[in-house]
Image: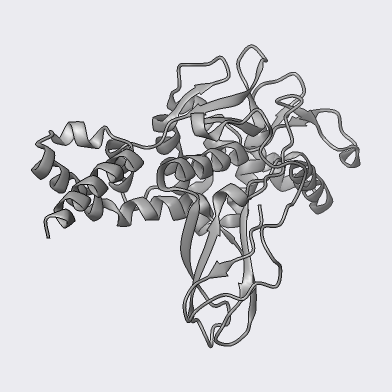
């Protein structure tokens, strides 16, 4: 998903392309009903019986969910935060109604990213305001960027099977592969910070298996692969994987340097929740003071409903001025 960046005020971003751009096949399919929280995964989930599930029911985050996610320890990986978030807002996955952490970790990386985007849209609204820094190190001016989630497009590639045959370029029939999932993200997150090359080897080892054997291959096997073989595996993964990447493009208004950068939207959303914790506490205090509701009652409300009650109180107070 590639929206052109729109910005505000003096640090506006001039966009070389007008409006959102499309990489891939389809936008949201007709089966999706956002107003009811019903969405379709770009890839899909195979259960233990081999059945493919693609439709998902999401609920907007409540104040309790916002409070929990804003309080996640600072050193938690983005993958862990995504798992915690989706465990709280995914109500149903196809015919599967028991949603737990192992299931959420088993979702494809793209599917998890897509659900995070939709959960954010349901909770905070479609408009996103972000602050970037100019890519020119000698400038580094702050760039206020705005875009709309409901205008984004996603590259959909529904899964045909959980495991796939490796490309013929490898000249082997002994191995099969699957696409990376949330469990792989969590397992490699800390290593990626210190040794990105080894993290990639570990990721590939987790995603490969010997034909007819459900166990992963060893990391040492990946080390022994030729560069061409590694590149062939990575290319095949990229070819088969659906995409839900927010990429911002524009031009710095200060130095006119063009930029094109992917936005880690899950990390961005987690940061939004953390910075909004103080505001949430003030909202709870305000509603408790005027309606005499308990903290639990207030935090059980979705954000948009909570904000409607706050607006009613402010309208009433302003009417007495």
**What residue occupies the far top of the structure in this picture?**
49
Nearer the observer, 207 or 139: 139
What x and y, as percent, mark residue 127?
49, 55
Residue 119 appears in the picture as rendered: yes
Nearer the observer, 202 or 317: 317
Q: Residue 87 is drawn in which quadrant?
A: top left
Left or right of 280 on screen, residue 178: right
Above or below, comparing residue 166 to residue 233 in the picture: above
What x and y, as percent, mark residue 218?
65, 36
Tell me which residue sits at (63%, 50%) in the image.
152
Above or below, comparing residue 19 to residue 34 in the picture: below
Above or below, comparing residue 120 to residue 20 in the picture: above
- Name the colour scheme: one colour
What x and y, as percent, mark residue 175?
78, 30
Tell me which residue sits at (48%, 45%) in the image.
121
Left or right of 290 on screen, residue 115: right
Location of the C terminus by quadrant is bottom left
Left or right of 274 on screen, residue 289: left
Residue 281 appears in the picture as rendered: no
Above or below, comparing residue 305 to residue 134 in the picture: above
What x and y, as percent, mark residue 182?
54, 37
Q: How many marks?
A: 0
Nearer the observer, 93 or 202: 93
Nearer the observer, 133 or 214: 133
Tell me which residue sits at (58%, 56%) in the image.
196
């Amino acid at each position: 998903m590639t929206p052109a960046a729109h910005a505000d005020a003096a640090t506006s971003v001039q966009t070389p392309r007008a409006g959102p751009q499309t990489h891939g096949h389809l936008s949201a399919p007709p089966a999706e009903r956002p107003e009811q929280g019903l969405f379709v995964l770009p890839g899909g989930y195979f259960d233990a019986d081999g059945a493919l599930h693609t439709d998902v029911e999401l609920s907007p985050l409540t104040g309790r969910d916002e409070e929990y996610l804003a309080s996640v320890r600072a050193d938690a990986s983005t993958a862990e935060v995504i798992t915690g978030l989706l465990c709280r807002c995914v109500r149903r996955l196809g015919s599967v109604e028991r949603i737990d952490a192992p299931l959420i970790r088993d979702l494809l990386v793209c599917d998890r990213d897509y659900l995070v985007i939709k959960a954010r849209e349901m909770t905070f609204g479609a408009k996103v305001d972000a602050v970037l820094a100019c890519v020119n190190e000698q400038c580094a001016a702050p760039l206020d960027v705005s875009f709309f989630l409901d205008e984004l497009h996603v590259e959909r590639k529904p899964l045909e099977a959980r495991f796939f045959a490796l490309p013929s370029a490898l000249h082997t029939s002994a191995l099969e592969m699957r696409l990376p999932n949330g469990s792989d993200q969590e397992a490699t997150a800390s290593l990626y910070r210190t040794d990105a090359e080894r993290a990639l080897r570990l990721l590939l080892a987790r995603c490969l298996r010997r034909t007819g054997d459900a166990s992963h291959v060893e990391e040492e096997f990946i080390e022994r692969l030729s560069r061409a073989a590694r590149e062939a595996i990575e290319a095949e993964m990229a070819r088969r994987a659906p995409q839900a990447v927010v990429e911002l493009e524009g031009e710095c208004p200060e130095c006119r340097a063009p930029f094109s950068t992917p936005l880690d939207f899950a990390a961005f959303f987690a940061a939004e929740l953390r910075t909004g914790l103080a505001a949430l506490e003030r909202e709870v205090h305000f509603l408790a003071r005027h309606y005499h509701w308990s903290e639990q009652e207030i935090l059980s409300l979705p954000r948009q409903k909570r904000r409607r009650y706050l607006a009613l109180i402010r309208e009433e107070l302003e009417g007495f001025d």
